Image: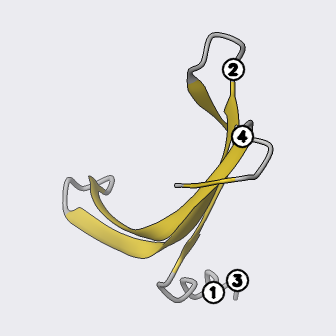
Amino acid sequence: MTVAGSGDLAYSTGTYQMSVPDDSGKSITDHGKYVAVWKKQADGNWKVAVDIWNTDLPLPAPPDKR
């Protein structure tokens, strides 16, 4: 985590990989990148203020509407 000079904001970046079951129970694996912005609370704890991720996988083909 990189903390701003003010000491109350920070950010973290990285890559992720996760597997989840699809509707048929088959495991699907995704991987990509993320950025999270953290804010220091009055009690000294850090909480995520903003979190975004982007998959590296290509978009699925749109359904055929013929």
Q: Residue at x 80, y 43 (%)?
A: 6
Check if mark 2's residue and mark 4's residue have beta carbons within 8 Å. Answer: no
Q: Is residue 50 visible?
A: no
Spot occupied by residue 42 in the image (x, y as percentages of width and height): 72, 13
Query: For the residue marked with disc 3, what is the amino acid?
Result: Lys
Estimate the spatial distance between the alpha carbons at disc 4 and disc 3, rounded to whole Å: 53 Å
For the rendered model, the colour scheme is: secondary structure
Query: For the residue marked with disc 4, what is the amino acid?
Result: Gly
Q: Which mark is residue 41?
A: 2
In the picture of the structure, the residue carrying the numbered disc 4 is 7
Spot occupied by residue 1 in the image (x, y as percentages of width and height): 52, 55
Q: Which mark is residue 65?
A: 3
The local secondary structure at tag 1 comes to loop
Apparent side of residue 42 relative to residue 59 in the rendered image (left or right): right
Estimate the spatial distance between the alpha carbons at disc 3 and disc 2, rounded to whole Å: 50 Å
Number of other residues with Cα within 10 Å of mark 4, as a class: few under 14, some 14 to 19, many 20 or more: few
Spot occupied by residue 22 in the image (x, y as percentages of width and height): 31, 57
Q: Which mark is residue 44?
A: none
Q: Is residue 27 visible?
A: yes
Check if mark 3's residue and mark 1's residue have beta carbons within 8 Å. Answer: yes
The local secondary structure at tag 4 comes to loop
Q: Residue at x 20, y 53 (%)?
A: 25
Estimate the spatial distance between the alpha carbons at disc 4 and disc 1, rounded to whole Å: 52 Å
Estimate the spatial distance between the alpha carbons at disc 2 and disc 4, rounded to whole Å: 11 Å
Q: Which mark is residue 64?
A: 1
Number of other residues with Cα within 10 Å of mark 1, as a class: few under 14, some 14 to 19, many 20 or more: few
> Quick one: label 3 or label 2, which is nearer the N terminus?
2
> Quick one: label 4 or label 3, which is nearer the N terminus?
4
Estimate the spatial distance between the alpha carbons at disc 2 and disc 1, rounded to whole Å: 49 Å
- Of circles 3 and 2, which is in front? 2
